[in-house]
Image: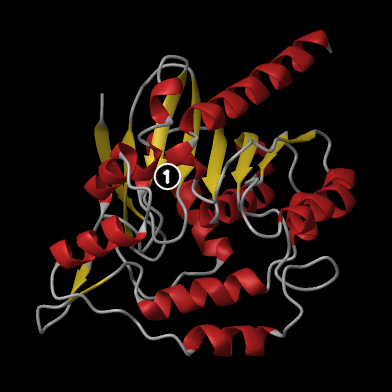
Amino acid sequence: MEKPFCYRTQDHTLIHGTIHSEQGEPIIFLHYMGGNEAIWSGVIPSFTNAYRVITLNLRGHGKSEDPGKGYDFATLADDVAMALDHLEVPAAHLVGSSLGAYVATSFAARYPKRVLSLANSEGALQNDRGPGGKFTESKEERMAKIRRRSETIYPSKAAYIEYLRTMWQPWSELKEKSLDGLELTQGEDGSFTTKPSWNSSMKLLESLFDIRLEKWYSQVQCPVLFLPAEKEEGLEGKLTFIKDKLEPILTRSQITVIPGTTHAMMFDHFEEMSHAIYSFHKDVANRSVKK
């Protein structure tokens, strides 16, 4: 089943999502920056028999509106809280990829009683700056580099899709399926740009640079599964940060590195990713029963 839903946030931004199954504990999947809820199509079937599966388009992504504001992680977490309220879900498992992992962790810090577990794939694994962080440059230097890039404009949606198929190799059936949730912004001249807008994307990246994950995770009360990609740059730095900075402040956590994985592991390792999350949930449940 696929049951679309939508709701308005506190600042009246329209957010879209989909319910994929109705039975079991709720599990919410949050996509990466520039993605949409359809990226999870390979993972979802592993959970529909045992969970109430929900996918969301974060603000500015997919069918959700891009209001040009609210791209701080407190607001993004509150958007998720309103999704749970709208669906009358008291608490849920959260699975996030990259940006979605940051949103999920922010939510778990702000609403600890509403999160059953947290699975973070390639996001919220390491601070951008500070001791053990990804970058040595300042926020100003980092953002100046990013702003030197220019926004890409496409003559048509078909042109953008063709660009994706050419650049995003190897192409696959699941990547093709993710196009089902793709939405672009059309300008007055008929050209197209990606969502979220360039300005909204810059706000997101600025917000990311200011995050101190130790503060967030110190407020998280649920079990946490870390899923860093084996083939992604900086794996050792992520593992060191998790072990030195995050694991000591978490009650229950686990690191799983799936062999061969890259940043968007839900495409080329969807079965292994699903198994890792499902196994983590079972292990947590078994430990709770033994207590």
Q: Position of residue 227 (x, y in %)?
A: 65, 41
Q: Quadrant of the N terminus?
A: top left
* Residue 64 visible at all: no
Q: Horizontal placement of 204 versus 88: left or right?
A: right
Q: Residues within 10 Å of mark 1 (few under 14, many from 20)?
A: many
Q: Amino acid at mark 1?
A: Ala
Q: Is residue 101 above or below residue 75?
A: above
Colouring convention used in this rendered image of the protein:
secondary structure
* Residue 123 visible at all: yes
Residue located 73% across and 64% down the image: 127
Circle 1 is placed at which residue position?
83
Q: Is residue 130 above or below residue 33?
A: below
The kind of secondary structure element at disc 1 is: helix
Q: Horizontal placement of 21 versus 111: left or right?
A: left
Q: Position of residue 144 (x, y in %)?
A: 56, 90
Closest to the observer, 111 or 156:
156
Q: Horizontal placement of 183 versus 121: left or right?
A: left
Residue located 21% across and 61% down the image: 162
Closest to the observer, 273 or 207:
273
In terms of image quadrants, where is residue 190? bottom left
Q: Position of residue 181 (x, y in %)?
A: 26, 49
Q: Position of residue 283 (x, y in %)?
A: 71, 18
Q: Is residue 141 above or below residue 51?
A: below
Closest to the observer, 4 or 99:
99
